[in-house]
Image: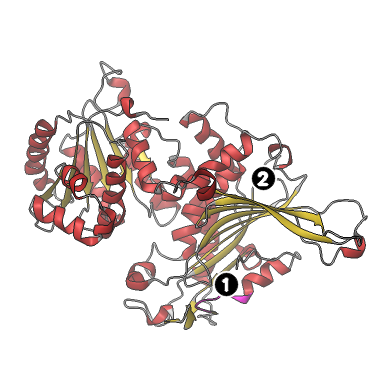
Amino acid sequence: MDNKEQLHPCMIVIFGASGDLTKRKLIPALYDLYTRKQMPEHFAIVGVSRTAFSDDDFRQKLFDFKSDNYPDADQWKAFSNHIHYHAADSTKLADFGDMKARLKQLADEHKTGENMLFYLSMAPQFFEPTIQNISAAEMVTEGKRYCSLDRQSKPWQRIVVEKPFGSDPKSATHLNSVLANVFEETEIYRIDHYLGKELVQNMMVLRFANAIFEPIWNQSYIDHVQITASETVGVESRGAYYDGPTGGAMRDMIQSHLLQVLSVMAMEPPVSLKAEDIRTEKIKIFKAMRVPKYDDVPNIAVRGQYGDGQLGGKVIKSFRESEGVNPESQCDTYAAMKMYVDTWRWGGVPFYLRSGKAMAKKVTNIVLYFKPTPHILFRDMAKQRKANQIVINVQPDEGIRIRFEGKVPGHKLAVKDVELDFDYVKQWNAQPPDGYATLLYDVMLGDQTLFKHRDEIECAWHAVQPVLDYWQDNPQFDLPNYAAGTWGPSAADILMAQSNRYWHNPK
């Protein structure tokens, strides 16, 4: 559906614009929207950072990073005319005077009006002072929505906050309070690029538009669920960050991305497709997540750290040899966790979440394992039979695969697993749009469906904090405990084997 007519003129202000995210993700995503004619007619993009650049220097820096992102020279030129740069330190209120004057001048030049989208693309320690300075500089007009004299035509100011959103429940709650002092909840967009991925959104269609799936999407039929996000690369140049207080697979991936995927996969049907109705159902799932007890952590969670290894002929050095990493680091580059969602639908069904770096294959998927059939017609073949599965590939090879049993042709009764495969690219002859493009478009529309509510953030932290506390208090002396290029530590396989289950490791 083309909602371009609902896009209001706006200015996009990216704080921390000299960083990697802007050139790697944000500008390419906005360019993609521009070429698809999904940007407002009147818009401007202003990068703000301490490094001094002219507008032309900044544009060239963005283009040179990866010119393949911008294959059409004329379109890039037209698009880049909307890009500007202003050197300022957003943590210093004194710098906001000149910044406001520049933004006013550019707003007049590009006819963007007072609508403004603030994007915090910076280290998390700069979030709070930047938010407070936006408020102190009176860049949020009319204050609270309910005080507005004209709610229909009220200019809007929205803010997008990147992860990490806090490092524990206390810091996340504090950041939510800081945001709430300046912005209404309806104007706060806590971004998670996983929710912008096409196949995550497609889960709602799979479940709620198909009568063959929804009746069996519950504890009566499903044995367990696995959610995996694995990467083949190590930490590369991000070793110091990853070994810091907001790094590690549990904080970086499971607490943020994978619990969000779980909430969409497990939610009840919303009463409508409006953002508030979808978020209401997601919040119910987050509130139903069973918070593990401290003493139970060894039985429900596994951490790992990669050592030396090879993948595709490439040698990968151990995490502890990465620049900026403590040679005795306890950081988890791999984490797996068994969770329960205590609702009527999911009571007793374990959810296994895992994420790791330097693993055997790059994949993000959700796998539903179904319970065995109750009859014993094929008991002689029981050892060869596999569980029925629905595999939702989020990335790469986007699609949905259903594994079930079929008869092998011939006179002899032989059963073998077969697959029905829906390949997203082949079926629609189109590549899924980048997650950031989808999410930025939604921010400009004012659609919060794919963004986190404050309750989701805080519940997610509470769900993993006992694990983090236990790991902090109990150093693990066998690290590193898995070779780069493998599927993680053996303890993760033991975690599954304890209940006669196994990980779905795609070849």
443 or 255, nearer to the observer: 443
Q: Amino acid at mark 2?
A: Asp
**Residue at figure coordinates x 61%, y 43% from the top left:** 266
Name the mark on residue 487. 1
| Quadrant location, the N terminus | top left
Give the vertical position of 311 relative to 86 (above or below).
below
The residue at 72%/69% (across/down) is 497
Q: Is residue 252 above or below residue 316?
A: above
Q: Judge whether residue 237 is colored magenta.
A: no
Between the residue at mark 1 and the residue at mark 2, the CA separation in whole angstroms equals 29 Å
- The residue located at (18%, 48%) in the rendering is 47
Query: Where does the magenta region start and end?
Result: 483-490
| Mark sitting on residue 228 | none
The image position of residue 331, as x and y in percent, is 45, 72
Disc 2 residue crowd, few under 14, some 14–19, many 20+, Cα 10 Å: some
Which element type, helix, strand or loop, lies under badge 1? loop
| Point 15% across, 52% down: residue | 59
> Farthest front residue?
410
Q: Is residue 214 above or below residue 164?
A: above
Q: Which residue is mark 2?
A: 342
Mark 2, secondary structure of its residue: loop
Work out whether residue 260 can be spotted.
Answer: no
Q: Where residue 288 appears, x then y in whole percent? A: 61, 43
Residue 206 screen position, x and y as percent: 61, 40
Tell me how the rendering is colored: secondary structure
- Residue 402 rendering spot, x and y as whole percentages: 68, 51
Residue 485 within the segment the image draws in magenta? yes
* Viewer-proximal residue among 98 and 197: 197
Badge 1 density bin: few <14, some 14–19, many ≥20, Cα 10 Å? many
Residue kind at label 1, given as amino acid type? Trp
What's the magenta bit mostly, secondary-structure-wise?
Answer: loop
In the rendered view, does 295 fall on the left or right side of 89? right
